[in-house]
């Protein structure tokens, strides 16, 4: 498994931006499929974005969020722009250590992942 540590959450006004970071401890990070999910009270953990050598997004965030990775520093990022109150949630990064499928769209569901961070809270409110 992978140890994952998220940071960067906080309070932001609607229309604002935040960048979440997730540092990973894993020897072959560059080959690791990674994703971001979010969870609100009373709802399950929903897919936000995934990255392999390409990227894939949930419809709700497409055009506003961007996932990227730094394979030198073993970090995955989620840049969130034009934030809306409905983006308020706890955001989790995830890794699929057994993942071998090359397309990021394959990793748009929780069951593809075996390692999770502790989460970072994002609140969008005026």
Image (cartoon, rainbow, N blue to C red):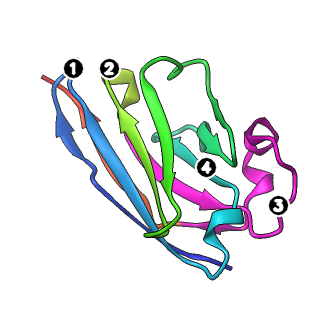
Among numbered discs 4 and 2, the one appearing first in the sequence:
4
Residue corresponding to mark 4? 35
Proximity of marks 1 and 2: CB atoms separated by less than 8 Å: yes
Q: Secondary structure at mark 2?
A: loop
Q: CA distance from mark 1 to mark 2?
A: 5 Å
Quickly name the residue at label 2.
84
Q: Residues within 10 Å of mark 1 (few under 14, many from 20)?
A: some
Which residue corresponds to mark 1? Answer: 14
Residue 20 part of the magenta segment:
no
Q: In terms of image quadrants, where is residue 113?
A: bottom right
Q: Which residue is mark 3?
A: 99
Q: Which quarter of the rendered picture does the C terminus lie within?
A: top left
Alpha carbon distance from label 3 to label 4: 12 Å
Query: Is 95 inside the magenta-drawn segment?
Result: yes
Query: Magenta region: which residues?
Result: 89-116
Residue at the spot x=30%, y=19% of the render?
A: 82
Which disc, if any, is residue 100?
none
Q: Nearer the viewer's eye, disc 4 or disc 1?
A: 4
In this orientation, does residue 44 appear? no
Across and down, in percent, residue 43 comes to 56, 37
Query: In front: mark 2 or mark 3?
Result: 3
């Amino acid at each position: 498994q992978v140890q994952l540590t998220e940071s960067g959450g906080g309070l932001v006004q609607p229309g604002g931006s935040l960048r979440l970071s997730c540092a990973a401890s894993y020897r072959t990070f560059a080959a690791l499929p990674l994703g971001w999910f979010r969870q609100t009270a009373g709802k399950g953990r929903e897919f936000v974005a995934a990255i392999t050598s390409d990227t894939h997004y949930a419809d709700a965030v497409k055009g506003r969020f961007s996932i990227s990775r730094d394979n030198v520093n073993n970090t995955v990022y989620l840049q969130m722009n034009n934030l809306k109150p409905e983006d308020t949630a706890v955001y989790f990064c995830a890794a699929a250590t057994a993942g071998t499928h090359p397309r990021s769209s394959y990793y748009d569901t929780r069951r593809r992942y075996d390692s999770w961070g502790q989460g970072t809270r994002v609140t969008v409110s005026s």
